Amino acid sequence: MENILNEKDLNQAEMEETTADEMLRTEELEDMTLDDAVDQEDPETAPVEGQIDKEEEILNHGEGNHSGRTMGRRQTKARRLLEQMSQPEPQIKHSVLAGRTERVETGLDNNDIQVSNARRENRIIEGTIESVRLRGSGRIVLSISDYCGYRVVIDEENMGVTIRRKEDETDMQYRRKMMRVFESMIGAKIFYVIQYYENKIIIGNRKRANEIRSGAAFRRKNSAGEYVLSVGSKVPATVLSVFRFFAYIDVFGLPYSITRHSFRASYVSAISDYLSVGQEIEVYITELERDENGNLLKLGITMRNDEKELEEQTRLAKGIVEGMEYLAVITSRTSKAFFLQLKTNGMLCYAYLSGGVRCREIPEVGDQVVVRIVEEQVNRRTGMPTFQVNIFRRVGRGN
């Protein structure tokens, strides 16, 4: 049967010598960063204008950016609060929420006490990013889920997210990119400490909290005096933002990226098919260096567990019979091949565009198709089994 997808730039002899892993290698985005992903995948949108309000004033106060009469009023208010918190005979009670004995200042309710204690102790607090705004002052402010009845906001400087600026970017282009980066993190779980609070509004500092978290995690030792974390350790992480080929994650307060290559050894068409913002995952430490004081110098992480994955893929491959037909879903395509997943057990396979498509309809990503197994192959780069197939007919779209 004549091949319907006859691409002029494909040479059959070349295709026969091209292995699946060679094709995949050209598709990887190994050095993609968070701002690269935003540049590639998100359309530019105009920033949202805001107005300077009470929240903005408190943000300024938290940073010390205030002057004149306003500064004088706030200093007076701050002194009164400090005087109130330093009464010579404070009451003592046990806090069920905190699980320990705390000071109770006269005139403050339980929520105020919780916030006061959290700030004094530099307590690490968990919250969820709920919205992002570009305020009239030009600063980007993130709203975090409430804490003890207080609104929580964190500005861009205290988020601890580094966004590279290109030489040819205008101020407006850079601000738009920053907005897209932070908007991609809506729904993510983060940790912060209280930098300042007033009028039921908390100014949080994620950057400082992450410094505390990473320091505690990587300096921690067991009873034998050995570091708890080492190469090979499996540790928890949180997904902060997800794009098609890239995910931005938090590992003990340190930002890392997960590409398709570091997600798993087998071919992955899109990271976004597997991860979502706010998801809790586990990663493995592949590289770890400290100085003589235990300060972290270098860290490498991956989600891949090649040994476990090889065992699973080998088990699945044993159930596939050459020459038989199976229902499959096209998960992606390159310039040279379709990549598919068998519905029967999830086994990964591929079909060459030249010679491997035998149906009259042109299949698309997401289509369900009937394939015939040609032969089992081994990915030379990863050692994972896969199958070359021919696509015979399209039976519909969907999962």
Image (cartoon, rainbow, N blue to C red):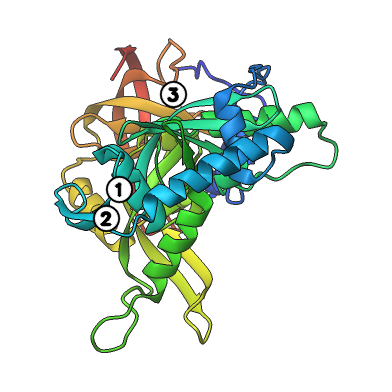
Q: Nearer the viewer, residue 31 or 1?
A: 31
Alpha-carbon span between mark 3 and mark 1: 76 Å
- Which amino acid lies under the numbered mark 1 shown in the image of this protein? Glu
Residue occupying image coordinates x 44% and y 58% = 380
Question: Which residue is the site of mark 1?
Answer: 105
Q: Is residue 106 left or right of residue 214?
A: left
Q: Could you tell me which secondary element the residue under label 2 belongs to?
A: loop
Q: Is residue 92 visible?
A: yes
Alpha-carbon span between mark 2 and mark 1: 6 Å
Q: Could you tell me which secondary element the residue under label 1 belongs to?
A: loop
Q: Nearer the viewer, residue 39 or 260?
A: 39
User: Which mark is first along the chain, 1 or 2?
Assistant: 2
Question: Which residue is the site of mark 2?
Answer: 90
User: Which mark is first along the chain, 1 or 3?
Assistant: 1
Up the image or down, 361 lies above or below 168; here it is above
Q: Nearer the viewer, residue 132 or 123?
A: 123
Question: Is the Cβ of the residue at disc 2 closer than 8 Å to that at disc 1?
Answer: yes
Q: Which mark is residue 357?
A: 3
User: Which mark is first along the chain, 3 or 2?
Assistant: 2
